[in-house]
Image (cartoon, rainbow, N blue to C red):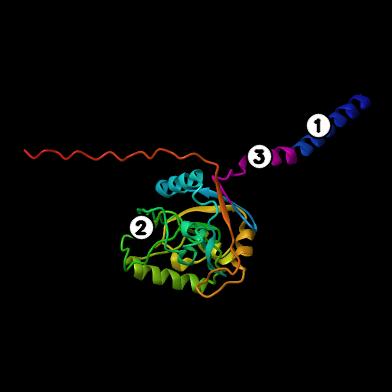
């Protein structure tokens, strides 16, 4: 009897040990499955920046992928760099020797309607569309090709509260950040004063350190880098068809 009991106990112990050994392996497998695949990769002189594009900013998402597939971004540069703020690129003028000094004024010849969503904000790594100022662009339409990546800085609770007050005045309605958004600004950083005024259409999922490296380069007057930081963008996702909203038919008056 004792022998049988010992055998049973040994089997239970062995099974328990195998289970404990298998748990980390299973968890590792689940973690691998959850890894987000990039929709696009920005190759730079300082490394790769992997991007996730937002589905509910379809005009900007599709446009970015379309231009990447056409090779429009290849050979352009980050023509405007401000440390602790952002790095801006995507202007075709920046790869034209005759128009290089005009970088910041070029584009594909069209703008995009704003797709400003309350969910998306200017945390570090946010991908947003550049645009002309409100004075000449009251609808806040985006540049057809120019974009920026946020570096920013970490914010205090008081600074976030001030940003909320200022945005409430700009938007003419009460504006409040969620707890998650506040946490991101306090721990990761960003540029909250730009929120709800520019279209944020994606974010960096790998390569935040590359943004830091680029933002640290030496610049000249006008925030232009002394040495060009070249860009090549490769689209990994496909351009999706945008479903048109059906217009409600007006009922005929009797």
Q: What residue sits right under mark 3 in the picture?
A: 30
**In the figure, residue 253 lies in which quadrant?**
top left
Secondary structure under badge 2?
loop
The furthest residue to the right: 3
Secondary structure under badge 3?
helix
The furthest residue to the front: 98
Question: In the displayed structure, does residue 220 sit left or right of residue 10?
Answer: left
Q: Which residues are magenta?
A: 23-42
Q: Nearer the viewer, residue 35 or 42?
A: 42
Q: Taking 145 as reference, is 242 above or below it? A: above
Q: Residue at x 57, y 55 (%)?
A: 231
Question: In the displayed structure, does residue 226 sit left or right of residue 3?
Answer: left
Figure quadrant of the C terminus: top left
**In the figure, residue 163 lies in which quadrant?**
bottom left
Q: Between disc 3 and disc 1, whose residue precedes?
A: 1
- Mark-to-mark CA distance, 2 and 1: 63 Å
Q: Between disc 2 and disc 1, whose residue precedes?
A: 1
Q: Residue at x 40, y 38 (%)?
A: 241
Figure quadrant of the N terminus: top right
Q: Residue at x 66, y 39 (%)?
A: 30
From the top left corner, tell me how far across and down residue 10 is, in percent. Answer: 87, 31
From the top left corner, tell me how far across and down residue 52 is, in percent. Answer: 53, 48
Q: What residue sits right under mark 2 in the picture?
A: 141
Do callouts 2 and 3 mark residues in contact (Cβ within 8 Å)? no
> Is 33 a magenta residue?
yes
Residue 55 visible from this viewpoint? no
Is the residue marked by circle 2 packed among few (<14), some (14-19), or many (20+) residues within 10 Å? many
Question: In the displayed structure, does residue 232 sit left or right of residue 244?
Answer: right
From the top left corner, tell me how far across and down residue 14 is, in percent. Answer: 84, 32
**In the figure, residue 152 lies in which quadrant?**
bottom right
């Amino acid at each position: 009897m004792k022998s049988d009991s010992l055998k049973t106990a040994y089997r239970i112990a062995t099974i328990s040990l195998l289970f404990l050994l298998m748990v980390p392996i299973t968890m590792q497998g689940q973690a691998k499955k959850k890894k987000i695949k990039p929709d696009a990769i920005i190759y730079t002189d300082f490394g790769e920046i992997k991007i996730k594009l937002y589905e509910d900013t379809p005009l900007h998402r599709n446009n970015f992928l379309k231009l990447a597939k056409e090779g429009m971004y290849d050979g352009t540069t980050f023509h405007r760099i401000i440390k602790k703020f952002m790095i801006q690129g995507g202007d075709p003028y920046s790869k034209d020797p005759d128009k290089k000094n005009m970088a910041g004024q070029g584009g594909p010849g069209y703008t995009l309607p704003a797709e400003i969503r309350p969910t998306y904000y200017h945390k570090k790594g946010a991908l947003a569309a550049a645009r002309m100022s409100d004075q000449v662009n009251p609808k806040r339409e985006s540049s057809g090709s120019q974009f920026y990546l946020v570096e920013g800085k970490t914010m205090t609770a008081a600074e976030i509260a001030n940003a909320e007050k200022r945005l409430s005045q700009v938007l003419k309605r009460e504006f409040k950040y969620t707890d998650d958004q506040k946490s991101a600004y306090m721990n990761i950083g960003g540029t909250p004063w730009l929120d709800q005024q520019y279209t944020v259409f994606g974010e960096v999922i790998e390569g935040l350190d590359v943004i830091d490296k680029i933002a640290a380069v030496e610049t000249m007057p006008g925030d232009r880098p002394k040495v060009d930081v070249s860009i090549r963008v490769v689209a990994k996702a496909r351009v999706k068809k945008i479903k048109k909203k059906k217009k409600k038919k007006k009922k005929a008056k009797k």
